[in-house]
Image: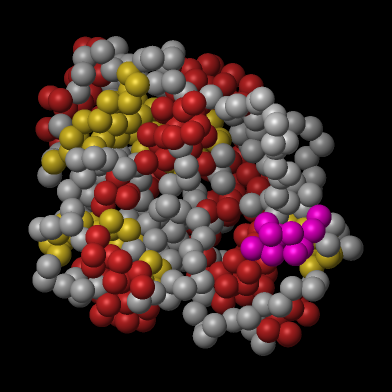
Amino acid sequence: MDVHISLDGRRDLAGQIYRQLRAAILDGRLRPEDALPPTRELARHLSVARNTVSVAYDRLMGEGHLTGRVGSGTFVSAAGAPAHTATPGSALRPKPIWDSISPWPGRGTTSDRVRYDFRVGVPDTELFPHESWRRLLAREEPVHGYGNPAGHAGLREAIARHIGVSRAVRTGPGDIVVTSGIQQALDLICRVMLEPGDRIAVEDPGYPPAQLLFRSLGAEVVRVPVDEEGLCVDALPDDARVVYVTPSHQFPLGVSMSLRRRTALLDWARRNRALIIEDDYDTEFRYGGRPIEPLQNLDSSGHVVYVGSFSKVMLPSLRIGFLVAPAPLRQALRAAKYVSDWAAPMAAQAALARFIDEGLLARHIRRMRREYQARHELLTTTLPGWLTLVPCSAGLHVTALADEDPAPAVARMRAAGVGIMTLAECARSSSARPGLVFGYGAIAIDGIAEGMKLVR
């Protein structure tokens, strides 16, 4: 491998290795079929732990940039190489909607200049039990067939038990469809429910990737305001076919929908024969108060699809999520999964089922809850006086409101190496209030203490 890797300090070493290798693949310095050194050899060369290099390799494999061959080694994948540019004279053009959609800046890799990384929705992958996960993956035999489009039977059973105990979701394995993350779950639901031009209501401010998806499918996105009780149900249009909400931990404000609003939202859905998509965002990490009962548990008429993911409780690169289908939509959602991509990788699904059944997921969540709570408490108690915290007791981020546009302060912070997002960037809404959104999943507690000194 003719690529030089340099490590700056001792923070997020796996992330530094990952970013430099990924950049070398994308700019062509590493080409398809080029071999990478064994993890032990590269770790010795860089003077780091072998597990640090393994984490970087695992992430690149999860994104399709690398492939492993038993007995041969690790190679750059042809599928992960940059695509050739189109012929200059080509008459091919995408639909106009794609000219207005670009990746959301809240996710993905950060610049090497960022020393204090307050990205939103990114977990701490350094603390994940990688050895246990690799052990479970290694036990799985190759699957010679396509598998069930709804997902691995053992995983659907494990998910049903897990969310039944942890979130009081009323479900069984027959209701579960395993998906490639939350985004595919939303895509399947919209394929089943929406015709081009149908209206879908979303929270304002709300989760940008979901809104981009809805627009790309030809739906009319109607933004509905959020206050301290959650979505303002009175502002919902009666002709909306679907409403997408994050009621237990609203993104990005962090408020929880009151019981009064939850009841009103379910009544609205019944009256208008509409569907509610309940994204149970970040509720595994709650640091105070009683758990918030999901809408799905309160729904007695089958108007709620509950969606969840393992991206933040485990690894973003795992790309395994799920939806809980009400009876009228169960068959259609399975069919939509079949025509979309048939099934997520079965070996990873089977390993995840064992990970849940052996208690490793619950143990990891307990450990990370303690770690994230300490970060949450430090961040919320060190905010400067010009910011007002939006009360929040869950998740991997907090939002703080400002009296005026924070853009000048953000420019100074970014120049000093602070990776930070404004509320307007996070919400992609013209009506977004001035403020900042601080993620604390990707930054260690000592980094928070140092980084917050630059938030001024």
Kindly indicate the quadrant of the structure image that contains residue 94.
top right
**Observer-nearest of 73 and 420:** 420
Q: Position of residue 244 (x, y in %)?
A: 32, 31
Kindly indicate the quadrant of the structure image that contains residue 150.
top right
The colour style of the image is secondary structure
Q: Position of residue 34 (x, y in %)?
A: 83, 62
Left or right of 220 on screen, residue 86: right
Left or right of 242 on screen, residue 230: left
Q: Quadrant of the N terminus?
A: bottom right
Image mark count = 0
**Observer-nearest of 23 and 305:** 23
Q: Is residue 379 visible?
A: yes
Image: 309 above or below 8:
above
Q: Residue at x 57, y 72 (%)?
A: 16
Image: 273 above or below 215:
above
Left or right of 65 on screen, residue 155: left
Magenta part of the chain:
23-32
Left or right of 81 on screen, residue 98: left
Q: Residue at x 52, y 75 (%)?
A: 12
